[in-house]
Amino acid sequence: MTATIGTPVSRVDGPAKVTGRAPYAAEFAPPGLAYAAIVESAIPAGRITAIDTAAAERAPGVILVLTHYNAPTLPYQPAKERPAVEPVSGDQLRVLQDADVTFSGQPIGLVVAETQAQADDAASLVRVTYNRDPAPLTRFDPARSRPTSEAAASRGRGPETRQGDPDGALAAAAVRVEGTYVQPREHHNALEPHATVALWEGDHLTLWSKTQWVDNERDEIARVFGIPAEAVRVINPFVGGAFGSALRTWPHVTLAALGARRAGRPVRLELTRRQLYHSVGFRPHTEQRVALGADRDGRLTALIQEAVGQTSTYEEFVEATLDAPAVTYACPNRRTGYRLVKMNTNTPGPMRGPGHATGLIAQEIAMDELAAALGIDPVELRLRNSAERDPKKDLPWSSKALRACYRMAAERFDWRARTPEPRSMRAGRDLVGLGMATALNLAPRYPAQASATLFADGTAVVRSATSDMGPGTYTSMTQVAADALGLPLERVRFELGDTVLPQAQEHGGSTTMASVGSAVRDACRALRARLDDLARSQGGDAADAAGLLRRAGLNRLDADGSAEPGDEQKTHASYSFGAVFAEVRVDPDLGTVRVPRIIGAYDVGRVVNPTLARSQVIGGMVGGLGMALLEEAEWDPRFGRVMNANLAEYLVPVCADVVELDAIFVPGEDTISNPLGVKGVAELGLCGVAPALANAVRHATGKRVRELPITPDRLLMA
Ligand code: MOS
């Protein structure tokens, strides 16, 4: 048997996806399906004084209209332990439970009808009167910010971290740079809108629902309705992109279940594109102040990074913005501080590389400014400040090949051709800029379980309740299983996305292969051992699995497996690393920025599938291009709303925006972090891209834009 791990296997679910046979949440249609539409608050803050549903109830096809006046009181039992994807404190939005309005777009009613068009039409006929709060908190005002809470501190997101004497060291530094960096509210904009199909059979609830964590959705909905977790099944075999937006169980899932219960029929609730902008979290608008001090040789002596983010009035979401900056470089004196502005908005949430991507934007632009102030090459400056241990925890790295990343990416990019002086490189009329940045992302793992079954026809099914939001989990897990079982890839099928399967945690944080992959390997090795036992006891060849089972008179052979983090999490710091290099061409008159190429080199430990890994990181590059140049939710503080809540006006990169993307993976494996030797790939690909582009724009133009995205107007005015 040749190993499939490390080979560029094509997606096993590719044919199902391109032929439309892969079912997504909204496509499940149990008999008798009815359709739901949400009635939303038109004001950002206040109280509902009346809702007139008469016209809606009379509209054709309407089955029911639910508001807080007629909805049942739901128990909303608290979780014993707050799941990792929840905000650090506060209470989730309780739908249709009272008259309070805390953000524009908040669900305040639900219409269920025979067709979607009838539901939408009836929802538009609901008349709501409010007592408006005259002074809603709709402006992002850093002056009104407060330090994060005690609860946040207990979750590792405290108001401050400190080492040495950062302010004293900054004052005494030979060279100092200081700046404020702004990154706007950004939205996931996955292709597939969030949707839930809810079906009650007696007291048992089945949800076909877009999620990155079926087990959590089951537990969450069970608590909302006060029913046992066993009474809920969540199914979601395919996810059309999520990027963190489907980690939590958002209020629309409760609404779908509530509507189905009341209607006595299965109900489908699919969010509209516009609704996604206030329903499923977002990357919070964040302002960061960075101050760096260094000696004349470029060694960092002081590192201060402070962030002000936004959260809702009802929950405290604290992004991991300052986690990365504390460990990227060695520096004896460091301070980070986090403050929050509470606003009348829905709660932000994790979005692709949450925190690490944003913290690195400020840090890596500031490092570029420091390189310029010192007259040191940006790559050389980073090498001089290389952290040989985790500077925050003072632990050795589980593995780190960042130096090789800088070297290999710089070579492929031909960084040597860069002339350091801004505006010194041209291509025809265009200014050419070359920039770079460091990338890193935490590489933890979680406990996970899996099962493996061998059938008498020699095929195997391997299962775990994880998800595949696009990275290729079906494929990579099949590879891990096939290798551990010693079976050809075609004989193995991997199943996921169902709460009846062995438990797994969030398909997020780039943790799935390290966590679930290790459990899959364990289950398959256990099954393989049972097969070997059978071969020994019966005489026979373990490689002829079908023959062995047949002779033993068995239809199937089963084994369970699990894996959980061990001491390595206490003894080592585990991160994926990368170096990103980008070229821009800037029209000097129009301020338009084109991106001919981005090249990254990555240390992600062992690469299970080079094609999938490459897809992950070049996808991240495209996302990073969006962050740097295009993406911005335009917030209207008068109404507390996103104005460009659609894909025509919220710009994301399209094919024409990108030319050459290239990824290099530094060979190696992380023998400490997990049995597979992998580190997370996915979110690392987004990290470092936006600052590399911003630094390239500065090199091209001599202008430093500290507010993203770098739009033509911002660039021309800088
Ligand atoms: Mo991750 S925030 O689930 O892409």
Image (cartoon, helix red, strand yellow):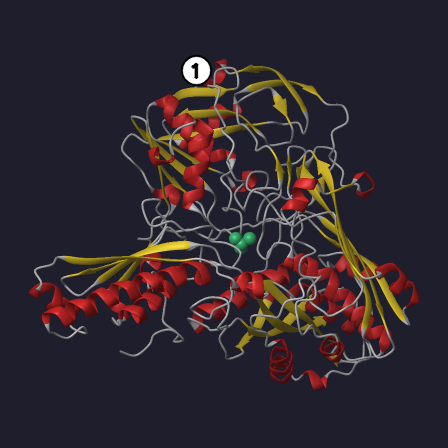
Left or right: 396 as drawn, with respect to 472: right
Left or right: 278 as drawn, with respect to 607: right
As rendered, which of 595 and 182 lies closer to the eye? Answer: 182
Asked whether the viewer can see residue 706, the reply is no
Please name the amino acid that badge 1 sits on.
Arg
Asked whether the viewer can see residue 597, the reply is yes
Q: Quadrant of the C terminus?
A: bottom right
In the picture shown, does residue 396 fall above or below 351? below
Percent coordinates x, y for residue 520 in the rendering:
35, 61
Q: Secondary structure at mark 1?
A: helix
Rendering quarter of residue 474: bottom left
Q: Quadrant of the N terminus?
A: bottom left
Q: How many numbered dots are placed on residues in this image?
A: 1
Q: Residue at the location (76% across, 38% down)?
A: 139
Percent coordinates x, y for residue 430 in the rendering:
74, 74
Percent coordinates x, y for residue 484 in the rendering:
31, 69
As rendered, which of 676 and 409 lies closer to the eye? Answer: 676
Rendering quarter of residue 423: bottom right
In the picture shown, does residue 49 fall above or below 216? above
As rendered, which of 631 and 212 lies closer to the eye? Answer: 212
Q: Residue at the location (90% across, 69% down)?
A: 173
Q: Which residue is mark 1?
A: 58
